[in-house]
């Protein structure tokens, strides 16, 4: 049975009966196969999985889609039940922020100022602040995050490390549609034409990752994006595997963000660079 609680008092009471390690999967709802994969991975290890569903106002900018973000609690609950989740915590804004907007928040540091951080000021501070609160409220021993939001995963890992949070942060590879599109709650906003255009993101990353020289990687991926008029690129960047500088050789990451119509999409892939011989 999956229990649903809305308040922190009911959450605490439900957690008192957990026994054993608690795993958490944090989401903003509108659950899809990507979220399900996080739940399944969590269930493999932990009997007691908590899913949080909270569209966090603190991580949305003034011109972003907070109001418009899909909210589908009944469908989300059915998915959590099907995945054997023990507890769903779907709090109100007041339950997460009982004293109003917090005056002390997380500073994501240098890693939070590149890529998404450059395009979305305040986003990562808001995200880390709610993640820290939800980790404590859910008493999680392990928390699962998708590689789909690769910079988020890297920042949460670093927060746990730098602030000695007693939690393990586990990453889960990106789940895609058969044609390559990374699953996202925002995909439902795409018209059929826009969905076709959006495929250029994963196609560009896949093509880029077939190359091993940084210039060739970016040229190949950039060409595919430039050839798709429905896609307005925000950034296409190659970094080290930990989002640091591009290494001369070895593991790296290729990341893209773009607008398709009014919908902002992000995606990324791992790749390996080699020196020319
Ligand atoms: P969201 O509801 O978009 O905030 O995402 C909640 C969690 O699900 C985050 O850890 C995301 O990285 C993860 N997630 C979202 N989409 C995918 C996907 N396509 N594959 C794997 N994980 C995902």
Image (spheres, rainbow, N blue to C red):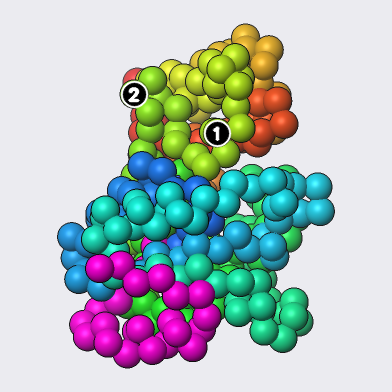
Residue 19, image x and y in percent? 22, 85
How many numbered discs sit on the rendered protein?
2
- Tell me the magenta residue range: 1-25
Residue at the far top: name it. Answer: 227
Question: Earlier along the polypeptide chain: callout 1 or callout 2?
Answer: 2
**Alpha carbon distance from label 1 to label 2:** 16 Å
**In terms of depth relative to the viewer, which is nearer, 157 or 69?**
69
Which image quarter: residue 142?
Answer: bottom left
Which image quarter holds the C terminus?
Answer: top left
Q: Report the residue at 35% width, 53% height from top.
A: 78
Residue 237, image x and y in percent? 58, 35
Label 1: element kind: helix
Q: On the image, numbered disc 2 is attached to which residue?
A: 178
**In terms of depth relative to the viewer, which is nearer, 105 or 76?**
76
**In terms of depth relative to the viewer, which is nearer, 70 or 152?**
70
Q: Report the residue at 74% width, 47% height from top.
A: 64
Label 2: element kind: loop
Residue 263, image x and y in percent? 66, 33
Choose mark 1 or mark 2, whichever is in front.
Answer: 1
Which image quarter: residue 133?
Answer: bottom right
Left or right: where does residue 219 sit relative to residue 142?
A: right
Q: Residues within 10 Å of mark 1 (few under 14, many from 20)?
A: few
- Badges 1 and 2: C-beta atoms under 8 Å apart? no
Q: On the image, numbered disc 1 is attached to which residue?
A: 188
Question: Any atom of ligand 1 within 8 Å of the CB at mark 2?
Answer: no
Q: Is residue 82 magenta?
A: no
């Amino acid at each position: 049975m999956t229990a649903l609680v809305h308040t922190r008092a009911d959450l605490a009471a439900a957690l008192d009966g957990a026994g054993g390690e608690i795993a958490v999967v944090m989401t903003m709802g509108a659950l899809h196969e990507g979220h399900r994969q996080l739940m399944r991975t969590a269930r493999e290890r932990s009997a007691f999985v908590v899913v949080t569903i909270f569209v966090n106002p603190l991580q949305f900018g003034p011109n972003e889609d907070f109001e418009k973000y899909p909210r589908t609690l009944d469908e989300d609950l059915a998915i959590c039940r099907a995945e054997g989740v023990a507890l769903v915590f779907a709090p109100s804004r007041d339950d997460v922020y009982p004293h109003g907007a917090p005056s002390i928040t997380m500073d994501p540091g240098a890693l939070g100022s590149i890529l998404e951080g450059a395009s979305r000021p305040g986003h990562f501070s808001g995200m880390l602040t709610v993640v820290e609160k939800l980790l404590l409220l859910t008493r999680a021993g392990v928390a699962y995050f998708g590689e789909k939001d690769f910079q988020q995963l890297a920042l949460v890992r670093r927060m746990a490390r730098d602030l000695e949070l007693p939690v393990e942060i586990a990453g889960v590879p990106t789940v895609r549609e058969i044609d390559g599109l990374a699953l996202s709650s925002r995909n439902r906003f795409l018209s059929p034409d826009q969905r076709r255009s959006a495929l250029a993101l994963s196609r560009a990353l896949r093509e880029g990752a077939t190359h091993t020289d940084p210039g060739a990687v970016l040229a190949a991926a950039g060409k595919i994006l430039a050839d798709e008029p429905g896609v307005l690129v925000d950034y296409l960047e190659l970094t080290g595997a930990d989002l640091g500088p591009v290494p001369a050789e070895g593991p790296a990451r290729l990341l893209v963000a773009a607008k398709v119509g009014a919908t902002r999409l992000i995606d990324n892939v791992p790749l390996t660079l080699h020196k020319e011989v």
